[in-house]
Image (tube, rainbow, N blue to C red):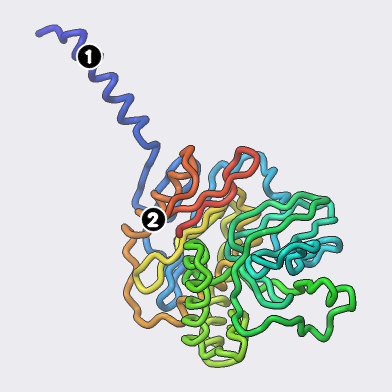
């Protein structure tokens, strides 16, 4: 028997190690794993309603859970000492007031604001423009876009006099639909207004002020959207480590949202779902989702968790204290 050359054996070992370390990606017939993130890789009827298909994403090793202590904006709006106000210029020019709000956090909680969060009230409803962390005991200005065109006055008759004086926002209205969020990511106010007009028109929820929150008007489209919400709302409870979803509508990936903390995801899921359902309930067609498309979107987003690169034109990544918090599809 011919003796194997040492250099050939050495090359074989190197090739094997490189193959094992190349991407740390594994796939079975049911799951696709990248690092600690694991996506259901096949269509599951339990996660499909009409033209909306969701692919659950689990975080099999979410870490020490420190991020779970962050309050979401919907929660913070109910905390004494936390308020969002119209931008206070302190005697300076009013330029830029429409696209900026002032956040006052006198509470002991650290608050996570997500790009796409919609707040109602003030002089005009707004959508948060980028992910932010607001520390306890701080006052800061944040970038926003308008999601209401034809109002610039404080009209909340139930507000207290102090709230009227500072034009405080009193309501939280879910995560915006992917159509609106994409315009927010693009950073164009006219694009945001156009996207809001598209979704409210398709929902038959047009109002004199053209606000996105008019989606709550009763009607046939709202009933249809509510059916999506009722179908999906409690499904995540069976997956304690579920930390995200890939959303496909009428065969097209419309969104990917993954959080490092399953706890944050579970608390934000209903709001995210509202946005997905808003688009799905106004999108015609019933084309089946292609698992390959969902898998490709998941790979692109999940690989960013292990990369030093942050956001680009297709994928967003929000880090805080050296850890990633939110990965999302733009």
Residue at the limit of the structure toward the right, as seen here: 161
Q: Judge whether 167 appears above or below 116 on screen.
A: below
Taking the image as drawn, is residue 276 in sight? no
Residue 168 seen in the current view: yes
Picture coordinates of residue 141 (x, y %)? 71, 58
Instruction: Choose top left, top right, bottom left or bottom right for residue 112.
Output: bottom right
Q: Which mark is residue 297?
A: 2
Report the quarter where the N terminus lies.
top left
Q: Residues within 10 Å of mark 1 (few under 14, many from 20)?
A: few
Q: Is residue 311 left or right of residue 29?
A: right
Residue 227 location, x and y as percent? Answer: 54, 81
Assign a secondary structure to mark 1. Answer: helix
Q: Quadrant of the C terminus?
A: bottom left
At x 60%, y 54%, the residue is 240
From the image, tell me which residue sits under label 1.
9
* Position above or below: 267 against 32: below
Q: Secondary structure at mark 2?
A: helix
Q: Which label was assigned to residue 209?
A: none
Query: Closer to the camera, 43 or 139?
Result: 139
């Amino acid at each position: 028997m011919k003796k194997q050359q040492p250099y050939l054996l050495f090359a074989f070992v190197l090739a094997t190690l490189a193959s094992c370390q190349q991407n740390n990606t594994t796939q079975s017939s049911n799951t696709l794993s990248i690092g600690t993130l694991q996506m259901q890789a096949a269509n599951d009827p339990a996660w499909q309603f009409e033209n909306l298909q969701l692919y659950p994403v689990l975080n099999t090793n979410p870490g020490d859970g420190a991020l779970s202590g962050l309050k979401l904006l919907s929660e913070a709006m109910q905390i004494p000492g936390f308020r969002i106000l119209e931008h206070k210029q302190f005697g300076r020019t009013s330029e830029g007031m429409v696209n900026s709000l002032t956040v006052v956090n006198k509470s002991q909680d650290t608050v996570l604001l997500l790009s796409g969060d919609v707040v109602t009230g003030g002089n005009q409803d707004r959508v948060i423009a980028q992910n932010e962390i607001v520390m306890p005991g701080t006052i800061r200005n944040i970038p926003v876009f308008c999601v209401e065109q034809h109002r610039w006055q404080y009209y909340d008759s139930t507000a207290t006099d102090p709230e009227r004086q500072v034009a405080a926002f009193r309501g939280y209205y879910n995560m915006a639909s992917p159509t609106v969020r994409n315009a927010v990511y693009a950073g164009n106010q006219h694009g945001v207004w156009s996207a809001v007009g598209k979704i409210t028109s398709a929902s038959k929820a047009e109002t004199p002020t053209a606000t996105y929150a008019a989606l709550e008007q009763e009607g046939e489209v709202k009933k249809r959207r509510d059916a999506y919400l009722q179908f999906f709302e409690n499904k995540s409870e069976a997956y304690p480590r579920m930390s995200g979803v890939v959303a496909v509508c009428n065969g097209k990936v419309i969104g990917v949202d993954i959080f490092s903390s399953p706890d944050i995801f579970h608390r934000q899921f209903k709001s995210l779902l509202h946005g997905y359902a808003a688009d799905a309930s106004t999108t015609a067609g019933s084309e089946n989702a292609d698992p390959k498309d969902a898998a490709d979107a998941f790979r692109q987003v999940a690989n960013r968790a292990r990369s030093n690169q942050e956001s680009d034109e297709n994928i967003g990544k929000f880090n805080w204290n050296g850890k990633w918090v939110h990965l999302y599809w733009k």
